[in-house]
Image (cartoon, grey):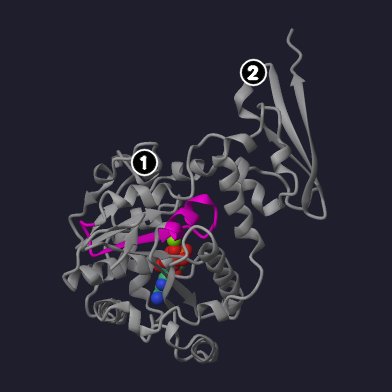
């Protein structure tokens, strides 16, 4: 049973975000194949592609030319969530596709998105499904934080490789931050070991380490490295359609079964998430920053008074600028970054914003206008 804004709906969806700040760890592979596995287990499932790279969208065979409404429209001022859903010929789940334009939604100056936008949009449909899965992007900007705010729990795919633990602590710190702010009840559905190769020492070591540290938070089901899993998306199919006899299909069916069993047993007694507070005891600067920024955006009195006032950027770190101003091509090592300010676009007059960094943080800024010499 889940609660939203004090209202108690029966048959509410379990919303699970599939997230990890590392790319290439199996988020998208897990999203598609778990969605189909839960479908086979007769659950009603919606998969949302919330990554501008749209790998899940191409992976289920949806062509970008054919997309009318996408997950970007869930962030509209008045979203019509049902209209964004498409049913797939080849799959046992419904789908909301993504397009590259989702990346633009992160630009704070142009959007009206707050942390709770997605949660509100999903509230319209959460008695239609048993599970809503969200395939997240590796960037923990406002869009992914929306997913973690809307979610009841998160599945963290952990790739069997040397640096896996490093990325994991960063991610757990982010989730701790979310818990403290926009989603106090978010739980870890489980850590999922992906691309496991029993012939490799590192695979076995990582599995032992994870189990030692995180105990029951680690799924018993393990996803083995299996070439069929990497082939299936190019045919627009889940592994269950592409090759039901593969080890990959078996692994994801096991995972689906494990999740259904756990959730049908009513989560409260499973003990998942209980140790979370103990594990998450480090600082969470980066995500805290974005969360604060969102609050700032929603609070009119603290918004910049005019378009030329960028003082709210002071103190920001380099890796946070793209989330606020949008992607740019600045050299990460340079201490001066430059942005063209879009509002005053003109062919002969171009306005630029210069950001000066000291110790990796913005110290001050300057606005400059270049006038082109016209004949
Ligand atoms: N268990 C696996 N075995 C073999 N290849 C895999 C497996 N899981 C994922 N891959 C491949 O690894 C790459 C990254 O996986 P993906 O799911 O796209 O990661 P992410 O969404 O985290 O970036 C893809 O090419 C995918 O096909
Ligand atoms: Mg992906």
Q: As drawn, which residue projects farthest toward the right? A: 358
Compared with 325, 225 (above or below) is below
Residue that badge 2 annotates: 347
Q: Residues within 10 Å of mark 1 (few under 14, many from 20)?
A: many
Q: Quick one: quadrant of the C terminus?
A: top right
Q: What is the quadrant of residue 326 in the picture? A: top right
Q: Are marks 1 and 2 in contact (CB under 8 Å)?
A: no
Compared with 8, 99 (above or below) is above
Q: What is the quadrant of residue 352 in the picture? A: top right
Residue 134 covered by magenta stretch: yes
Task: Give the secondary structure at mark 1.
Answer: helix
Residue at the image position 39 percent from the left and 62 percent from the top: 151
Q: Could you tell me residue 15's position as x and y percent?
A: 34, 63
Q: Could you tell me residue 371's position as x and y percent?
A: 75, 17
Q: Could you tell me residue 245's position as x and y percent?
A: 23, 80
Residue that badge 1 annotates: 73
Residue 68 covered by magenta stretch: no
Q: Which quarter of the frame holds ligand 2? A: bottom left
Residue at the image position 62 percent from the left and 41 percent from the top: 325
Front residue (pair 270, 206): 270
Residue 367 in view of the camera: yes
Task: Give the secondary structure at mark 2.
Answer: loop
């Amino acid at each position: 049973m889940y609660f939203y804004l004090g209202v108690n709906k029966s048959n509410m969806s379990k919303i699970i975000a599939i997230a990890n700040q590392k790319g290439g760890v199996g988020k998208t592979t897990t999203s598609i194949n778990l969605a189909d596995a839960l479908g086979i287990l007769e659950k009603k499932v919606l998969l949302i592609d919330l990554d501008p790279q749209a790998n899940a969208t191409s992976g289920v065979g949806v062509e970008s030319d054919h997309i009318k409404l996408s997950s970007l429209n869930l962030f509209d001022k008045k979203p019509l969530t049902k209209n964004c859903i498409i049913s797939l010929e080849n799959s046992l789940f419904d789908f909301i596709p993504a397009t590259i334009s989702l990346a633009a939604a992160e630009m704070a100056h142009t959007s009206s998105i707050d942390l709770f936008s997605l949660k509100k949009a999903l509230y319209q449909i959460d008695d239609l499904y048993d599970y809503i899965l969200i395939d997240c992007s590796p960037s923990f900007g406002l869009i992914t934080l929306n997913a973690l705010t809307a979610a009841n729990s998160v599945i963290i795919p952990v790739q069997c490789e040397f640096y896996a633990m490093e990325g994991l602590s960063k991610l757990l710190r982010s989730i701790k931050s979310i818990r403290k702010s926009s989603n106090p009840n978010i739980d870890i559905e489980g850590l999922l070991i992906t691309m496991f190769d029993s012939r490799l020492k590192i695979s076995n070591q990582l599995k032992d380490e994870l189990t030692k540290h995180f105990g029951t938070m680690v799924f018993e089901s393990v996803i083995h490295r299996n070439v069929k899993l990497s082939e299936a998306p190019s045919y627009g199919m889940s592994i269950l359609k592409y090759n039901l006899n593969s080890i990959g299909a078996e692994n994801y069916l096991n995972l689906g079964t494990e999740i259904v069993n756990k959730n049908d047993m009513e989560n409260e007694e499973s003990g998942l998430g209980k140790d979370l507070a103990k594990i998450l005891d480090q600082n969470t600067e980066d995500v805290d920053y974005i969360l604060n920024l969102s609050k700032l955006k929603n609070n009119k009195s603290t918004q910049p008074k005019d378009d030329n006032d960028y003082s709210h950027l002071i103190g920001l770190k380099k890796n946070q600028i793209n989330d606020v101003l949008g992607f740019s091509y600045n050299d990460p090592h340079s201490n001066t970054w430059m942005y063209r300010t879009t509002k005053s676009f003109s062919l002969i007059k171009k306005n630029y914003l210069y950001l000066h960094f000291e110790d990796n943080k913005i110290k001050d800024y300057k606005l400059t206008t270049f006038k082109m010499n016209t004949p």
